[in-house]
Image (spheres, rainbow, N blue to C red):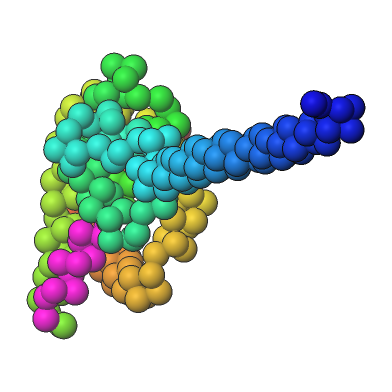
Amino acid sequence: MITPLTKTSSSEPASKTRAGGGAKEAGRPPGKEDAARRQRLLIAGIAGGAVVLGLVLLLILRPWQKPPPKLGGEPSKLGEFVSTSDFQKMTFEKREIYMKMTSAKKDEIAKAYAEGRLSIEDYQKSLLAAHLGKRLDDMRKYFAKPMGAERIKYLDKQLVKKDTKREARDHDPAAKKVEEEQDLLKDDAAQTAEISTWPPDVRAKYQEFIEALTERKKFHKEAMEAKAPKKATTSTAPTTRAN
């Protein structure tokens, strides 16, 4: 016979069982939350790694910088490149190569400017690069000669070539006009600024070469003036009227 006391006591284990079961159920969600949190952290870590990798690739590839033009490529592209900050960031050795190539393609660059394929600012800077490229090439050849007569002979040869070129230009009005325009675009301040970025030993040799060339120019000019035929002067004696 089941009494109320027995009924009450027999229901207690069931309550405890349900309570214990509830405790177990309550313990399950934290495990799921931990798994979800770990998954979120993993995803964030992968995304962060991708961002870092992307930044590293950007620093290496630098897509915002235009690659330097090929040395044998389009002259107008070469003229544009030597006017950029990317060119100035190059080592002197690399800049020298491009300056010498600009010198070799000077006439083609002038044509690109005349045809409107090169701005006047880029043209001016490319003329400076061409001028310094020619001077550096001459300087290297000068110091490659033995000291003394061989170096003097080399300078004289360069001055004679310049005289021949000037004579040919004087008989070509179009070429004369181009050279006059180029003379107007010379920028001594920009030239000084460029030379100041060169290595000290190169600057010292360049200065020595320029001084030797300037001195030889004076001698060459005097020699040419001495060889030039003197213009005959005719003197007219005053006439006297007979009274």
**Does residue 103 lie above or below 219 as drawn?**
above
Q: In the rendered structure, does residue 140 fall within the stretch colored magenta? A: yes
Position of 196 with respect to 234 (left or right) is: right
**Does residue 112 lie above or below 168 as drawn?**
above
Q: Residue furthest right?
A: 4
The front one of 36 and 118 is: 36
For the C terminus, the image quarter is: top left
Looking at the image, can residue 19 be seen? no
Position of 98 with respect to 43 (left or right) is: left
Residue 160, horizontal then vertical, whole percent: 14, 55
Residue 20, horizontal then vertical, whole percent: 72, 40
Q: In the rendered structure, does residue 99 fall within the stretch colored magenta? A: no
Position of 62 with respect to 23 (left or right) is: left
The front one of 187 and 242 is: 187
Residue 141, horizontal then vertical, whole percent: 15, 66
Residue 105, horizontal then vertical, whole percent: 19, 38
For the N terminus, the image quarter is: top right
Going 40% across and 25% down the picture, which residue do you hit? 119
The front one of 192 and 28 is: 28
Magenta residues, start to end = 134-146
Q: Residue furthest top?
A: 115
The front one of 204 and 97 is: 97
Going 41% across and 52% down the picture, which residue do you hit? 89
Magenta stretch prevailing secondary structure: helix
Looking at the image, can residue 132 be seen? yes
Going 12% across and 61% down the picture, which residue do you hit? 157
